[in-house]
């Protein structure tokens, strides 16, 4: 995306990172100073050029006191990947040298906005429309005039004259009127044209005096059709009629059908090459995808942004005996949907031994067509279930000249590559495995990436690893040379994993608005050959109306861990905010530390609500300062209509304080000097409802 004039060329579809530097010099003789500043941003070819369309000609004239329309070409800057939702409109009186006058700030980036013409007479006016949260902008192409009005008149503007509406959202706009030179004839408003099927409309007022405003709303709750719909808001003042067209683009926002598919949630012992698949949503256009080794997605191993596909191939080999997590969210013009709950799967585990050659480095001569060999001796091996050449590192002036073979102790010869990557001159650092999702890459990797060999390593599987392994490199063309620096092998044997298994997972009751330790009576996992201290739970999702906490570690979030031994000791507690009688819970997976996994069940807690609580609704209050040390203020937004009961609990669920606020009170200061440092729960109950907040005492 770039700034430009109306005859600017459309950019190609690319994304680039740009860094620009502004340098200032003072040119002082015999010792001038220099300073600079950098700005970094991305340029994309799927958006832009962003252009001012009106006023844009020297013949344009604005009249002081009138509502006039500024128009610009949004050019996809309001959607992914630019996502600029707001713009500022500024006025220059000196042919664009400065823009000191703000006509509108933070208005929607929808292509038009009515502004009130200020009393700034000039023949050198220009408009600048700029992104409110980005670096791009555009200017009027020519100077235009701002002049005094010549006769009394009414002008009419809309705060919004259309745009994309994501069903079932409603559309509303403010109808603004302005009186010029004392125009005082009353104004009558009505609607011309047809609304979308199922829509209804209303004016907050249909009779206005000049200078007053009214709100017009279209209720779209019952509309199910997409498409473009046009109608007109009409204003009549005596013999004058003003028409303001409105254009709505209705967009359904129903992602029904979207779901993660494979690898299945909780699948174990999967291969090291994986492709993620999901079912497309009804109104989804694109998808964001994230693949990680943590359900917190703090480290993204692979991803896709705004892909139209329903799959993502992981283009590298996964680690053995490891847990992975992935999630997807649908997108359309209305923005992104929610991220799906993460899916978990694990790869198969093996016992692996690695060996490195100790006869390197070796030179590859520039004379003739030399052959060099590097050998690894395995003194005691076993039957090979998997073989990975974990590293071949070196340098050659013309890589295409090289031919590489791996020869097993039994004499099996596998061609790794030959006649590949012409015109490449440089270093290489790569490995080979039949399980790799990537073919032989050119230029050859220089980062240790694992690729498929030219011929499969499969003929070697099932052999015994004991003996001498040979890497043979042949230089088939003279005059260019290089070196072989490293050669490493990894042999693996299948292992019989005895994974953890779920013994108990039953609904845990707890009084509404309190907390309770999760005990083995409610949640228990066992493993045939691992003690409880080695059975590690990983939190995948957290409760919606409460939280879980580990004593001494605080609130648990996705990616945090605890053990079955922690549950046995009563260290894991479930806190309920007391705002709903509905069951709540968290999802988890369990690992035994040796490649065994189990997932992803949901642990559920059921709040027990007394009859006096059945109709409770969440009430809002604030605690400040928070964190605090000596005291804290509890405040409502308005005086209480009934008595409020305040209770403070520690993380063990013990009631520590019980306070009362009378009807009419709005705030209360609470002395905390007697409370030790830690995290507490504050619950407030009134006749109208209940609310819970966390309090941190430092």
Image: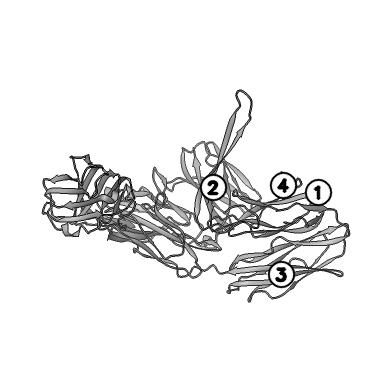
Q: Nearer the viewer, mark 3 or mark 2?
A: 2
Q: Helix, strand, or loop for circle 4?
A: loop
Query: In the image, residue 275 lies at what x, y percent?
Result: 35, 62
Looking at the image, tell me whether mark 1 or mark 3 is earlier in sequence order.
1
* Secondary structure category for the residue under label 1: strand
Q: Which residue is mark 2?
A: 41
Q: Quadrant location of residue 309?
A: bottom left
Residue 149's x, y, as percent? 86, 56
* 483 on left or right of 9: left
N-term-proximal mark, 1 vs 4: 4
Question: Which residue is tagged 1?
Answer: 122
Q: Is residue 558 left or right of residue 397?
A: right
Residue 202, numbered circle:
3
Residue at image position (71%, 44%) is 97
**Which circle's residue, 3 or 4, is located before the other in the chain?**
4
Alpha carbon separation for disc pair 2 and 1: 35 Å
Decide which of 395, 246 is in the foreground and name it.
395
Q: Is residue 162 left or right of residue 184?
A: left
């Amino acid at each position: 995306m770039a700034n430009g004039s109306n005859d600017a060329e459309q950019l190609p579809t690319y994304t680039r990172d740009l860094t620009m530097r502004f340098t200032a010099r003072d040119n002082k003789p015999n010792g001038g100073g220099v300073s600079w500043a950098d700005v970094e941003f991305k340029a994309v070819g799927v958006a832009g050029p962003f252009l001012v369309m009106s006023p844009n000609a020297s013949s344009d004239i604005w009249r002081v006191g009138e509502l006039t329309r500024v128009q610009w070409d949004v050019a996809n800057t309001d959607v992914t990947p630019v996502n600029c939702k707001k713009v500022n409109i500024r006025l220059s009186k000196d042919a664009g040298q400065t823009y000191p006058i703000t006509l509108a700030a933070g208005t929607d980036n929808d292509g038009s906005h009515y502004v009130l013409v200020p009393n700034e007479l000039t023949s050198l006016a220009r408009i600048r429309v700029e992104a409110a949260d980005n670096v791009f902008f555009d200017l009027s192409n020519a100077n235009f005039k701002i002049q005094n009005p010549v006769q009394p008149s009414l002008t009419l503007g809309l705060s919004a004259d259309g745009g994309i509406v994501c069903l079932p959202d409603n559309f509303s706009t403010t109808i603004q009127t302005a009186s010029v030179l004392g125009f005082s004839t009353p104004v009558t408003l009505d609607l011309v044209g047809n609304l979308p099927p199922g829509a209804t409309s209303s004016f907050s007022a249909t009779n206005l005096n000049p200078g007053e405003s009214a709100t017009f709303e279209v209720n779209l709750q019952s509309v199910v059709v997409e498409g473009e719909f046009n109608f007109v808001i009409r204003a009549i003042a005596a013999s004058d009629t003003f028409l303001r067209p409105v254009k709505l683009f209705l967009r359904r926002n129903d992602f029904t059908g979207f779901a993660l598919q494979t690898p299945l949630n909780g699948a174990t012992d999967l291969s090291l090459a994986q492709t993620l698949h999901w079912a497309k949503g009804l109104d989804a256009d694109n998808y964001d995808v994230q693949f990680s080794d943590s359900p917190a997605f703090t480290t993204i191993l692979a991803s896709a942004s705004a892909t139209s596909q329903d799959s993502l191939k992981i283009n590298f080999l996964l680690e053995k005996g490891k847990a992975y997590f992935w999630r997807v969210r649908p997108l359309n013009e209305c923005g992104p949907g929610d991220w799906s709950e993460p899916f978990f799967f694990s790869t198969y585990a093996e016992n692996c031994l690695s060996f490195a050659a100790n006869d390197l480095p070796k030179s590859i001569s520039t004379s003739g067509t030399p052959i060099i060999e590097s050998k690894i001796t395995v003194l005691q091996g076993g039957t090979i279930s998997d073989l990975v050449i974990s590293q071949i590192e070196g340098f050659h002036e013309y890589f295409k000249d090289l031919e590489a073979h791996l020869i097993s102790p039994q004499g099996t010869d596998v061609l790794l590559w030959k006649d590949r990557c012409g015109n490449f001159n440089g270093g290489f650092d790569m490995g080979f495995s039949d399980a790799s999702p990537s073919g032989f890459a050119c230029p050859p990797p220089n980062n240790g990436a694992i690729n498929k060999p030219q011929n499969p390593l499969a003929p070697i599987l099932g052999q015994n690893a004991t003996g001498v392994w040979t890497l043979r490199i042949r230089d088939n063309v003279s005059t260019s040379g290089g070196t072989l620096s490293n050669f490493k092998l990894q042999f693996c044997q299948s292992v019989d994993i005895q994974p953890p298994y779920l013994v108990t997972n039953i609904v845990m009751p707890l009084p509404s608005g309190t907390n309770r330790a999760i005990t083995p009576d409610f949640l228990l996992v066992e493993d045939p050959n691992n003690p409880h201290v080695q059975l590690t739970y990983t939190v995948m999702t957290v409760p919606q109306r409460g939280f879980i906490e580990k004593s001494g570690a605080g609130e648990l979030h996705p990616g945090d861990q605890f053990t079955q031994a922690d549950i046995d000791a009563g260290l894991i507690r479930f806190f309920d905010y007391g705002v709903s009688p509905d069951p709540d819970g968290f999802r988890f997976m369990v690992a035994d530390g040796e490649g065994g996994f189990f997932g992803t069940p949901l642990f559920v807690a059921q709040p027990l609500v007394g009859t006096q609580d059945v109709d409770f609704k969440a009430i809002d209050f604030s605690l400040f300062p928070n964190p605090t040390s000596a005291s804290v203020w509890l405040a409502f937004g308005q005086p209480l209509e009934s008595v409020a009961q305040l209770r403070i609990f520690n993380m063990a669920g013990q009631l520590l304080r019980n306070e009362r606020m009378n009807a009419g009170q709005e705030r209360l200061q609470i002395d905390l000097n007697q409370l030790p440092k830690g995290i507490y729960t504050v619950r407030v109950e009134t006749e109208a409802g209940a609310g819970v907040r966390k309090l941190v005492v430092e």
